[in-house]
Image (cartoon, rainbow, N blue to C red):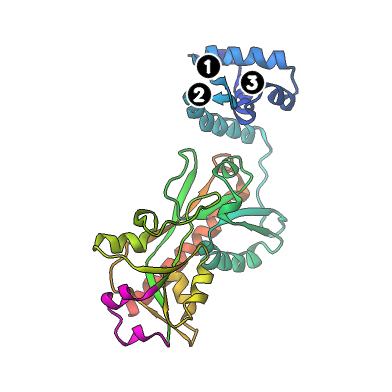
Amino acid sequence: MNIARVDLNLLVYLDVLLREKNVTRAAEQLGITQPALSNGLRRLRKLFNDPLLVRTSDGMTPTERALELRPKICDALYTLEQAIQPNMPFSPISSHRVFRIMASDYAESTLIPKLLRQLRIQAPHITLDVLTPSDVSFYDVEQGRVDMAINRFDTLPQSFHHTILWRDGFSCVISKSNPILEEFTLSNYLTARHIWASKTGMGIGVGVNPEDVQKLGWVDEALSQLGYKRDISVFTRHYQVAMLLSGQNDLIATLPTKLAHQQQGNSSLVVLAPPFDIPPIELTLAWSPLLHHSPDHQWLRRVIKSITIEDTAKQSDKQLQI
């Protein structure tokens, strides 16, 4: 098909229709009449040889073809909009931009403090609005309502851009008065009581089933591979709470190493390597294709990436010294 014969306004119509899933609301946003948009939808269906939106009990529901088209059309329209806008460079030193970042408890504790230090130097007027995974959905990120998401993701929407910031191992945080320190073996680890801490993905979480090892995460899956299971006394979604509870002399917190090392100056706690191998985790930065070409967004991504590169280099130097 020759694109010169395609009315590009139809792509704008489709973008709004797929967002609103309602012809009346979409027409109001576009500033056209409902019959005009209905006619546009008929032309779109003919253009793509697909119904695109089908009326169901839930309203207008996108077809599989429409869902496939959506990220491509969003990206194309954003590129076109950028092409016709004045080329204004981003000035961090004078910007008063608010960046909304979804960050897990782990990312908030390990990465955000370092990012804030850089922002004070490079962009003192920029504000960070840090949201939790329960505050945000993938749809919020896709629509650009949230600038980026920093977490450990099992899966991500195909339309998202993403990059791995770093990989991290695990360490055990234990009270100095815990008797297990006399002989920290796998056998004693298994007979001890433990604190479970994790929160991955997006959206509101649900209760944990202690018997469902496959859903308990990296530590318990690693033990399961060895044929073992630990005794978990408390489940929390906050790593800082896990570290606080590890001060009790009968509990062990097995946490990502970057978090555990924050307790190395705590005279009442000891940080040790686990008595078994646990595969590393990955911290990932994800963002919408709608923001991919935004100069201010590109700048912040570069700052975050430079921080993680420097952090990884320092960690490698420490390991070499050891």
- Please check the rendered image and state whether residue 9 is part of the magenta-colored stretch, yes or no: no
- Residue for point 47% across, 63% down: 308
What's the CA distance linking mark 3 and mark 2?
21 Å
Real-space Cα separation, disc 1 to disc 2, in angstroms: 7 Å
**Position in image of residue 236 (x %, y %):** 50, 65
Res. 61 image quadrant: top right
Eye-nearest disc, 3 or 2: 2
> Mark 3 touching mark 2, by CB under 8 A?
no
Q: Amino acid at mark 3?
A: Asn
Return the residue at label 1.
Answer: 51
Rendering coords of residue 203 (x, y %): 55, 49
Q: Residue at x 37, y 71 (%)?
A: 316
Residues in magenta, as a range: 177-193
Disc 1, disc 2: CB below 8 Å? yes
Tell which circle, 1 or 3, labels the residue nearer the N-terminal end.
3
- Precedes in sequence: disc 1 or disc 2: 1
> Sequence-wise, which precedes: disc 3 or disc 2?
3
Q: Position of residue 197 (x, y in %)?
A: 46, 65
User: How far separated are the C-alphas under marks 1 and 3?
Assistant: 18 Å
| Left or right of 224 in this view: 63 | right
* Disc 2: which residue: 63
Q: Is residue 266 above or below residue 256?
A: below
Residue neighbourhood size for the residue with mark 1, other residues' Cα within 10 Å, grouped as few (<14), some (14–19), many (≥20): some
* SS of the residue under disc 3: helix
The amino acid sitting under disc 2 is: Thr
In the image, taking residue 212 as reference, residue 294 lies left or right, namely right
Find disc 3 in the rendering and name its residue: 9
Secondary structure found at label 1: loop
Q: Residues within 10 Å of mark 2 (few under 14, many from 20)?
A: some
Q: State yes or no: residue 190 in magenta.
A: yes
> Which amino acid does the dot numbered 1 rest on?
Pro
